[in-house]
Amino acid sequence: MPVETRSSDIRPFVDETEEIEHEYDGPDEASVQRESSRGPVGDSTPETEYNRQSVTEEGHTGTSRAQSDHHMVPIGDSLSQSDSEERISARRQTSSYQTLQYLHPHPPPIYTAGNNTSVVSFKKARHEFFRNNLPEKVLYWPVNDHVKARLLSAYFQSASRWCEVTDSLKTFSTLSSHLTIESPAFAAAATALSSIMVMKGDEFSVLLVDELYSFARRALRGFKSEHRDGGLLAATILCIYGAASGKMREGQSTLLDCAELLQDHGLQVAPRGVLTACFWVFARQDIWASYLSRRPTLIPTESWEIPRCDPDVPIQDSYSKLAIWIVARIVNELSKQPADINLNTLQDLWAELQTWVVERPLSVRCVMELESLRDSCFPTILFSNPSAVCGNLYYHTGCILLLATEQILYATSAMASPICHARRIVGISMTNNDPANLVNNIHPLCVAARQLRAAVEKMAILKHLKEIQDSTGWKTERYILELQELWVQ
């Protein structure tokens, strides 16, 4: 029997196609931003696997742009404001008549040479912090990008460690690598310092090293106010350059510049970080410049931040800095006229040194100590880290300086002999011949050399100083000649 159909049960068909399509007419903001990043505002062509720009093309464009930026460093330019919001708004208008091309929220990112760089661009940094500077002039790098890359590589692998002998956190390298792009002053100073080590020998190399130094000085004058940390690090690095170059004029000039900049930043309220790291690099150079000139340190020790154990700072760093601080006060006291030297102060400083050596933490004590053998003039004294080497060298050096005054009472032990301390200084330097330590050992070695009498020991020290120059590029010829003249008398 056929089924009877009632007209009342039939439901009418409602076409909702237009309403459904209307819901897809307005893409969300993320889609608009993604679309707007594909090309100019007026380009509404959807991106597909056929018309997308290739990785090779983008990488080539980014590389060319980077190369041109490296050679030319603008001073004081300002950037126009970003127009991304306007482009998004315009894109919304053109996209309102299109259907959504991507149903997935985000397409996969594309690898390019630009996003392979782990640092922000210099222009971005200038745009964020210095919007109102006007164009003044342009500095041109004296070397191409390939030479620059080689020098920066040498800086991060070797030369930066000259500054980090009591800085296990590696402020001058690992923590500041991004500054090679953000701060032209830092990049220029880093290449100048490493050029001393890399470019040795021929006359052309010497001229290029001088040109890199001059370029770094100009960059520091033009950019030190634009990036606080970059300028401070650059000034400190150039201070090390002045000492390494063996040129007294440059050494004194860079030392004064660094002292002025450190004091301008305020050492009394110095936060832990770049300022503290820079100060201790400067302090080591200032101590020996003061010792050689018989003058007080440029920054009085009363203004120094006394090193204390800090959970955020490795204990070997803090304790080694304490030895440096004691030696700085010894040098300042001995810079006075003989009649003005306070004997009680000398005695107190001796007591501080002996307390330092007795209370050393394990990380500052030697791992092994062996007496000299027939084929060696000096003992073998091995340490596990550069900070420990530096701290113990300063301890022995301070003892020699005080004992040389012949005003120290109650010094009856074997360690009361300047010769004993001198032999240990040389032994420590020869055993721990890491480049980071070697350049910081030069002045303690010269102090020790004045106490030795045996010809074989003198020859060994002169050879060691020559090896330091050959391996690091740090000039030691001046000190070798001074010792030779002293021993001829």
Image (cartoon, helix red, strand yellow):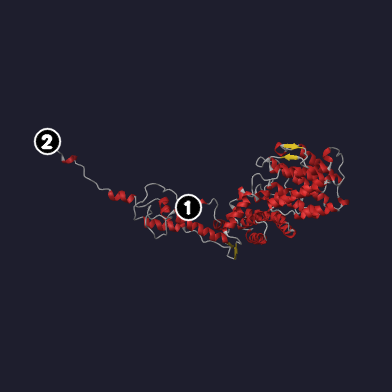
Quarter of the image that includes the N terminus: top left
Q: Nearer the viewer, residue 146 or 413?
A: 146
Q: Is residue 328 visible?
A: no
Q: Nearer the viewer, residue 199 or 404?
A: 199
Categorize mark 2 by other alpha carbons within 10 Å: few (<14), some (14-19), many (20+): few
Report the amino acid beneath label 2. Pro
Q: Which residue is mark 2?
A: 2
Report the amino acid beneath label 1. Thr
Local secondary structure at mark 1: loop
Q: Nearer the viewer, residue 125 or 1?
A: 125
Query: What residue sits 53% from the left and 58% below the top?
Result: 66
Give x and y (percent) for residue 212: 64, 60
- Picture quadrant of residue 2: top left
Task: Give residue 83's mark.
Answer: none
Tell me: 85 left or right of 211. left
Give x and y (percent) for residue 397: 79, 45
Query: What residue sits 70% from the left and 46% below the top?
Result: 437
Q: Which residue is mark 1?
A: 112
Query: What residue sits 82% from the left and 39% below the top?
Result: 415
